[in-house]
Amino acid sequence: MKFFSPLIRLFAVASVFITLAMASYSCHHIDSHRLHVAYVNVTFLTVGDWNFYGVSGAGQHKRFILQEKLPSGFPYTAMSSTGLGGILLCTTYTAQPVAYDLACPVECRSDVRVFVNENNEAECPKCHSRYYIFESPGHPISGPAAEDGFSLQVYHVGPGRSGEYMVVSL
């Protein structure tokens, strides 16, 4: 019986440690789906379209807002949609394309859009939350978004199914 007593104590201590670790982890959860689901479809039909309108070098970014016809001259189609606030298309420091919804996840409004500040971070003009966009995809840096664990909504960027060069989609 003496053999089991230390083993039971060890098990109890390990259980408490695991429970505390799990509770601590849950406090640092990042919510990347705070915005309501909005349809997204921005298609680059050719390599030429991507080279002209897309982003290819590390640290580049462009805004796509269908309602405002941005970028000017982009060949939007009847199937095009740019999410809740528009799309921020970026190329990470490792040259991977990534897309975010421009709507601030704290404000949750289509007319409150993040912008890229002088530190190459996305920043909300209203709540002043700041987000990483070229690393740690969309994670909050400061402001109410960091306090509440809200990251930017991330969208898929990849080759299209019908031979399109690149597609941003939900």
Image (tube, rainbow, N blue to C red):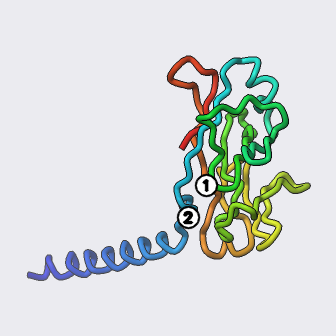
Name the kind of residue labelled 1 in the image. Gln
| Residue position for label 1 | 153
Q: Residue at x 69, y 61 (%)?
A: 110
Q: Residue at x 42, y 78 (%)?
A: 20
Q: Quadrant of residue 6?
A: bottom left
Residue lying furthest left: 1
Q: Residue at x 56, y 52 (%)?
A: 38
| Residue position for label 2 | 34
Residue lying furthest front: 78
Q: Residue at x 25, y 75 (%)?
A: 11
Q: How many marks?
A: 2
Q: Could you say where residue 144 lies in the image, as x and y percent from the top left?
A: 69, 75
In the displayed structure, does residue 132 sit left or right of residue 30? right
> Pointer 1 and pointer 2: residues touching (CB < 8 Å)?
yes
How dense is the environment of label 2, judged by Cα within 10 Å: few (below 14), some, or many (20 and up)? some
Looking at the image, is 166 positioned above or below residue 58? above
Please indicate, yes or no, whether residue 101 appears anywhere in the rendered image.
Answer: yes
How dense is the environment of label 1, judged by Cα within 10 Å: few (below 14), some, or many (20 and up)? many
Name the kind of residue labelled 2 in the image. Arg
Q: Could you say where residue 70 lies in the image, as x and y percent from the top left?
A: 80, 41
